[in-house]
Structure formats: structure tokens, C-alpha cells
Image (cartoon, rainbow, N blue to C red):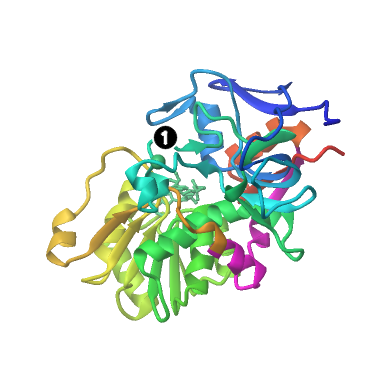
Amino acid sequence: MQQSDNLSAVLFKKGDLRLVQTPIPSKPGNNEVLLATQSVGICGSDVHYWVEGRIGSYVVNEPIIMGHETSATVVEVGEGVQHLKPGDRVAIEPGVPCRKCNHCKVGKYNLCANIFFHATPPDNGTLTRYFKHAADFCFKLPDNVSFEEGALLEPLSVAVYACKRAGVTIGSNVLICGAGPIGLVSLLASKAFGASRVCITDINEKRLQTAKDLGADCILNVINIKNTNEIVDCVKQCFGRSPDITIECSGAEASIKLAILATESGGCVQLVGMGPSEVTVPLLSACCREVDIRGIFRYRNSYPQALELVASGKVNVKPLITHRFTLEETLKAFETAKNGEGIKVMINCAKN
Ligand code: NAD
Ligand code: ZN
């Protein structure tokens, strides 16, 4: 190997993100590939670790490399790797499970307690020049899918999985709460899954306008509506009836309440947003009206479908990218993401 530069964005502790050189990874082992990072999208969780030093029980106790929404180029393949060769362009599914536990064996590998996940402490992420990854968690990109789109397959996989769990299908009426990056990809995925009408809420007008541009049938700014029943009525007006499915992508307590009350009896509330650990919600309404409340944790078996949606042109994720930086400008990129001005901040990690 000729590489000598492995500039990496390392979070040393809360508030202390720095660019430093880290060792270039050793030769890839069995079923592993050595990758040169291309595009990395910044996720709310990256910013959260930087600002707070933790998310729930995941605490930054030792320095970790940030970043997990990634595309890369294959540099070297280890023994047993069949489907990839040096030079291939790939999207990286960032979670590699143990493959041995019961959850893994039944295919629910996202629930594996021993999963390795980029940039979730203590596991290093991909805001670096080179890293190694399990070959079968690398998805070869066709020529018509860019590196940036490859990185965006990560949040899109969350949305694909949410749509699958919630049962979005042809003719569904879907309410989406929250028009952040996850709400917006959920809008795109819902449409691609066949939803007839999608209504989306937020308290930020700019984000709602983006949702409109991306194809939302109806946008609803709830900032000045204090009474949840009033919002439920507005939602009904949007659809002409109650939505079958609500995908909650804000994590806000008021929004989870709305999700339950607005959803048609017998329908489903799909929780995606992660807010406070405990919230007060109208559970009796969900119980008596048989509204199922489902959670999701990241995604499983969804990268291939996310890639198909982008490669076939059924989903266009490109308009989500509002800012671009180089790896050297990582701090500026994190500041921009923190300020919430844009939607998706992209970092180009390739050496110029
Ligand atoms: P984000 O913070 O950018 O977006 C949240 C949006 O919700 C913002 O636009 C905000 O204005 C809006 N909002 C706040 N209060 C609201 C209210 N009362 N009603 C409607 N909208 C409201 O975050 P994101 O990156 O889009 O992620 C969304 C959520 O999904 C986060 O909580 C994140 O932690 C979670 N998430 C969960 C998973 C999972 O596996 N379950 C995966 C990825 C992200
Ligand atoms: Zn496992």
C-alpha cells in the first residue's frame, strides 16, 4: 500500500472535534475490504455526540472517528471477497452485526446487541481517508448513482424500513410528522411505495417548503396551533379523511400525541423520531381504536431497496443536499449542520 495520509475527524470528548492523523488500517482480513472514503453525510446524531458527548447510554468515553453515512472506493479486497474488486464504487451499510446471536439468525440483525456501528461509541466512523469494512455490507453503485447519492442511502434506508414496518402501500394516505432529513426521505419513500397522498407537518416553514418542492401533497405548519384536536381536524381536511399511517419523525411529545390522535382507527403509528425517554401520550385512544404503535431501530435488509429506488430514478435524493465541504473543513461542516440552516451537509473525504 502506498497510502500515508489518513486525516480523520476525531471526537475526543464533548465539544472537542479535531482533525488528526490516525493509523492507516492494516490489510483487509477475510471477507473484508479496505476502502477510500468518498462522501459522508452529517447526521443529527453526529452533531449530538459532538455537542452533548452522548446519546442515551452511548457515551463518548474515548476518542472516536465521526461519520456513518458513507460511500467509498474499494482499494483492496481480503480473502474470500467475491463481488468486489479494487476501483469499485460502493455505499456502506454502517452496521455489521455479530451474525451468531438469535436476532442475527432470524434476520433481525439491527437488534443484535453486539453490532458494530460506525460512529456509535466505541466504534470508529468513516470521516477519514481509509477504513475497513465487511465486504457484504458494501453495496456496489451502478454508474448512474453518484457518491453523494450513495451516502444518502443511509437515511433513505431508515425511511424504506419505516415504510415497510408501517405497511405503506399503493393507495396509502400517509401523515409524516417532522420535515427534517428523515421526514423528507420518508416522504420520498412513501411516494415510491405507492402512497396516494402524503401530508407533512413541521414548525419550520422553510423545511415545509422543501417538503412541498419534494412532492408533499399538503404541508401543515403546527407552530401556532396549541390545541392538538385542532391539528387533527387540519390533517383530516388535508386527506379528506384520517390518514391510515403516520410516520413520526420529530420525536417531539406534542407530535407523538398528534400522530396517535390523527391516525385512522385500525391504522399504524410508526415511531422513527427519538425524543425524551419518557413522554405522555393518549394511549387509551390507541388502545380503543386499535392503532398500532411500532418502533424502528435504524434498518435491516433495506439497503438493496434504497439503492434500487435511487438507481431506477423512483427516488431523487439529490435536492436534499444543501451544503458541501471537504474533510479539511469538517468543523465548518458540523457548525453548519448544528445551525440547522440546510437539510443535508455533505463532506467530500477524497484527497484532492
Ligand atoms: P431533525 O431534528 O433535523 O428534524 C426534526 C424536525 O422535526 C425538525 O424539522 C423540527 O422542526 C421538527 N419538529 C419539532 N417539533 C415538531 C412538532 N411539534 N411537530 C412537527 N415537527 C416538529 O432530525 P432528523 O435528522 O430529520 O431526524 C428525525 C428524528 O429521527 C430524530 O429524532 C432522530 O433521532 C430520529 N432518527 C431515528 C432513527 C431510528 O432508527 N429510529 C434513525 C435516524 C433518525
Ligand atoms: Zn448478533
Q: Few, some or many C-alpha atoms within 10 Å of disc 1 (few <14, some 14-19, many ≥20)?
A: some
- Residue under pointer 1: 114
Q: Is residue 63 visible?
A: yes
Question: What amino acid type should be assigned to the residue bearing mark 1?
Answer: Asn
Residue found 33% across the figure and 38% down from its top: 276
Residue found 64% across the figure and 45% down from its top: 80
Q: Which region is colored magenta?
A: 305-326
* Label 1 residue near ligand 2, CB within 8 Å: yes
* Residue 329 pos. (x, y %): 75, 33
Q: Is residue 180 visible?
A: no
Task: Answer with left or right where residue 343 lies relative to residue 168.
Answer: right
Instruction: Please identify the quadrant where the N terminus is shown.
Output: top right
In this rendering, the answer to whether 164 lies above or below 95 is below
Residue found 76% across the figure and 52% down from its top: 88
Instruction: Please identify the quadrant where the C terminus is shown.
Output: top right
* Residue 147 pos. (x, y %): 73, 53
Q: Please, what secondary structure does the residue beneath circle 1 have?
A: loop
In this rendering, the answer to whether 164 lies above or below 250 is below
In this rendering, the answer to whether 286 lies above or below 7 is below
* Residue 325 pos. (x, y %): 75, 41
Task: Residue 213: name its quadrant.
Answer: bottom right
Residue 319 or residue 352, whichever sits in front: 352
Residue found 34% across the figure and 68% down from its top: 245
Task: Answer with left or right where residue 84 lies relative to residue 107.
Answer: right
Task: Residue 303: name its quadrant.
Answer: bottom right
Residue 236 or residue 168, whichever sits in front: 168
